[in-house]
Image (cartoon, rainbow, N blue to C red):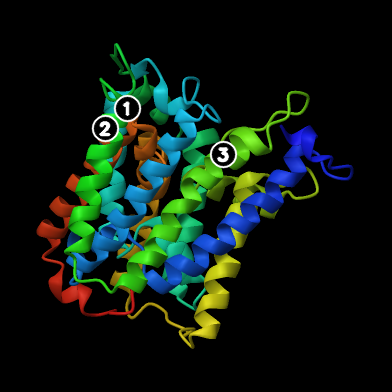
Amino acid sequence: MFEEFGFETLTAPQAVVWFALALGLAFGALAQITRFCLRRSLVGEDRKQAAGIWLTALAVAVLGTQAAVAQGWIGFGDHRFMAANLPVLAVVVGGLLFGAGMVLTRGCISRLTVLSASGNLRALTVVVIFAITAHAALKGILSPLRTTLGSVTLPLDSAALPGNPLIWTAVIAAAALLYALRSGNRPGMLLLAALIGVLVPLGWVGTGFLLYDDFDPIAMESLAFTSPMTDALFFTVASTAIPAGFGTGLIGGVLLGALAAALLSRGFQWQSFSSPSETGRYLAGGALMGFGGVLAGGCTVGAGLSGIPTLSIAAILAVASMAVGALATNRALGAVPAARAHPAE
């Protein structure tokens, strides 16, 4: 499909960087305005409104993604979400660790990336620790532990939800929208959340159909933060040796989009740690999210907002495990007083 556009100066791998940059710019700006975050939906003081935002985006992402599948533009048969042998132990353990980490850091990695662009040095520190730990789990010192946990698998007759995908699409979207409409959010805020949801099928279709090139193939990807964050880290420290890819463009776009939205709304404000104990808590949370995100196959955006629309059992299990980990950690910490310490997050 890519060659039909007649690009003469860009290859598909080069074009996808610009595409990811545009996708990231939109997500960064919209997430900054809506304060998009699954953690807030689970344990935040305004969790009902936050859940309405998240579920609106999910509903639109599911509808758009499955519509693209029905049109024959994309398919997930060969995608990692659809592996016949489910690495159940890695997914569950990873989800639990990620959920615990996002409570310790008061934000999932997508939210913290957005906050980093608005002057939050706590969030920026976590993002760096997350990227280093995730890279260590993928290619470094933590990779043997990752492969050991990943070796425990559960064979599946189908890696996707059984039955008619259109029925599952309708059920998920209807339930999400019904909750969202009763969440107390203003219509304008729900519309912005819906635009976040549109970015998911746009990402899948853009990389899997519009920019697909038989002679220079690229991976089919959409919004995510775990793998893209490791790509961005690697490119940052070795840009003369490796080219930029989808992940580099996406993370760069998110930072620029969030920065622009923060500056325009006068929401940019320098913030830092208040004590050594708080610093330690955030560092631990970042490491847990980095390792957990790799084990689970993605973060709350990669496995959640982008993964659930594929109807993948692995993605749904990962997000469910994240929710359990977050709720259990929040209960163990008695986190209500801590939540009041930094209301901007």
Badge 3 or badge 1: first in the primary sequence: 1
Across and down, in percent, residue 70 comes to 45, 29
Query: Which residue is under mark 1?
Result: 165
Badge 2 crowding class, 10 Å Cα cut-off, few under 14, some 14 to 19, many 20 or more, is some
Circle 3/circle 1 CB separation < 8 Å: no
Circle 1/circle 2 CB separation < 8 Å: yes
Residue 318 in sight in this render: yes
Q: Amino acid at mark 1?
A: Pro
Query: Which residue is under mark 3?
Result: 205
Q: Dot 1: what SS?
A: helix
**Quadrant in the picture for the C terminus:** bottom left
**Quadrant in the picture for the N terminus:** top right
Q: CA distance from mark 3 to mark 1?
A: 18 Å
Question: Residue at horizontal 18%, vertical 56%?
Answer: 179
Q: Is residue 277 above or below residue 101?
A: below
Query: Which residue is under mark 2?
Result: 168
